[in-house]
């Protein structure tokens, strides 16, 4: 059985700040909580005529659903006959929402809706079946902000620590620019002869 996050009481002591230990617990999530299957079956029972069709679909969806949280992004996959996989880099994430109905709240579950700048109105990824949804949301926000805040700092550091080869290339380009300017000034002024061409 894959490692799960701590209980809700343990999550409450996180205080909304992800420490490396919290990150490790979230990176270890691979499967949804078993209460998601109960929620799926109750949802299928809500439409009795469709139950024989919905129940097997939702059962196999639950048993094939896998999550993978890495330092670069998230992936989610499910399905038997038609396998579906969604992979999102943290840099693509634009917004994150939590959504839960009455039954999901009763089970202690919520959906984490991850939106990107893809232009679609719906969420690109819907992470469901996690009881640690607030900790995961905070983790995703910190990763999303970390990627966006890291880029300008990285560019500044790259400019400050230029290699000797880069400095030599810049000096050569400055010298070529200076010589071209001198050649342009040394050329006699252009005589159009009143032809009217510009």
Image (cartoon, rainbow, N blue to C red):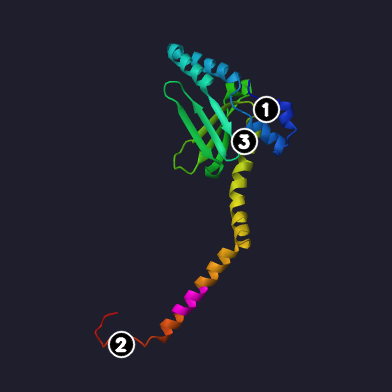
Residue 134 appears in view = no
What's the residue at 71%, 30% (across, down)?
Answer: 11
In this view of the protein, which residue sits in the foreground, 34 or 183? 183
Give how far across and how far down residue 81 sits, in percent.
42, 21
Q: Earlier in the sequence, mark 1 or mark 3?
A: 1
Secondary element at image label 3? helix
Mark 2–mark 1 Cα distance, whole angstroms, equals 80 Å
In this view of the protein, which residue sits in the foreground, 189 or 144? 189
Which residue is tagged 2?
191
What's the residue at 64%, 26% (across, down)?
Answer: 131
Mark 2–mark 3 Cα distance, whole angstroms, equals 70 Å
Secondary element at image label 1? loop
**Within the image, what quadrant is residue 119 found in?**
top left
Left or right side of 143 for 50: left
Q: Earlier in the sequence, mark 2 or mark 1?
A: 1
Residue density around tag 1, few if under 14, some if 14–19, many if 20 or more, within 10 Å: some
Vertical placement of 167 versus 7: above or below?
Answer: below
Badge 2 vs badge 1, beta-carbon distance below 8 Å? no
Residue 5: mark = 1
Give how far across and how far down residue 95 sits, in percent.
55, 41
Q: Which residues are magenta?
A: 174-180
Residue 153 appears in view = yes
Q: Earlier in the sequence, mark 2 or mark 3?
A: 3
Residue density around tag 2, few if under 14, some if 14–19, many if 20 or more, within 10 Å: few
What's the residue at 56%, 27% (across, down)?
Answer: 128
Left or right side of 186 for 20: right
Which residue is tagged 3?
137
């Amino acid at each position: 059985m894959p490692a799960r996050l701590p209980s809700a009481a343990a999550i409450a002591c996180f205080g909304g700040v992800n420490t490396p230990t919290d990150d490790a617990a979230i990176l270890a999530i691979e499967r949804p909580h078993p209460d998601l299957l109960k929620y799926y079956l109750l949802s299928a029972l809500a439409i009795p005529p469709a139950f024989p069709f919905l129940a097997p679909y939702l059962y196999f969806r639950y048993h094939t659903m896998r999550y993978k949280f890495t330092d670069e992004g998230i992936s989610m996959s499910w399905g038997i006959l038609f396998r579906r996989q969604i992979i999102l880099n943290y840099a693509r994430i634009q917004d994150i929402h939590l959504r839960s109905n009455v039954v999901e709240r009763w089970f202690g579950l919520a959906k984490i809706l991850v939106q990107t700048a893809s232009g679609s109105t719906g969420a690109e990824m819907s992470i469901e079946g996690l009881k640690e949804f607030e900790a995961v949301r905070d983790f995703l926000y910190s990763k999303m902000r970390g990627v966006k805040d890291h880029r300008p700092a990285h560019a500044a550091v790259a400019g400050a620590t230029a290699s000797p080869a880069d400095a030599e290339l810049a000096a050569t380009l400055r010298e070529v620019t200076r010589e071209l300017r001198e050649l342009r000034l040394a050329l006699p002024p252009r005589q159009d002869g009143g032809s009217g061409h510009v």
